[in-house]
Image (cartoon, grey):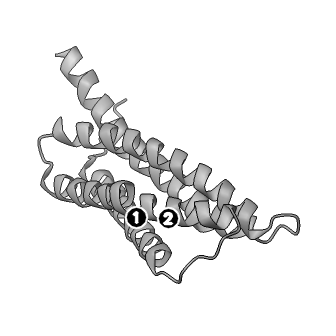
Amino acid sequence: MKGKEEMRRSVLFLQLFVPVLWLGFVSAISLMEAPLKFQAPSVDLAIGVDIGKLVFSALNRVEWVFFLIAFSSIMLSKNNRKPFVLGLVLCSILLIQTFYLLPILDERAALVIARKPVEESNTHYYYVGLELIKIALLFLLTLVHFKAVTLKPISK
């Protein structure tokens, strides 16, 4: 019985910790680092885009690790309908970003870095929109998991 209880506690820990950590990564990078780097006087557009390409590529890989851990913990739960649906939507966003938007943005970044002309595009706005949706979903997932945790009174 002790092993089962430890497993349950580990799953609960992952369900609460991983989405919050993931939310922190995405918020810090997408909402803070990305726009702030362009305010540094010594960072021109090409350098900023080069840094951004590197940072968002690394973030994407880390997000897949977070997703796999978070979704695995959801699958190990009994009451997982809402978290399962939220996990599927998060997976869809990651798939769109990884295999559609990031390759397009990487091609555009290569042109900017090479200081070549780049056509107007809304791709960056789609990526930002999905980041905002992802942030909301991660917050919601955390709330769903937190609500599922029952706090037991401390026995004397």
In the picture as drawn, the residue positioned furthest to the right comes out as 41
Residue 139 in the image: state x and y as whole percent. 39, 62
Quarter occupied by residue 130: bottom left
The residue indicated by pointer 2 is 105
Q: Is residue 75 left or right of residue 111?
A: left
Q: Residue at x 35, y 61 (%)?
A: 100
| Residue 153 in view of the camera | no
Q: Are marks 2 and 1 in contact (CB under 8 Å)?
A: yes
Q: From the image, which quarter does the N terminus lie in?
A: top left
Q: Is residue 108 left or right of residue 10?
A: right
Distance between the alpha carbons at the discs numbered 2 and 1: 6 Å
Residue 155 in the image: state x and y as whole percent. 34, 32
The residue indicated by pointer 1 is 101
Which is more toward the observer, 32 or 123?
Answer: 123
Identify the element where label 2 is drawn: helix
Q: Residue at x 54, y 81 (%)?
A: 119
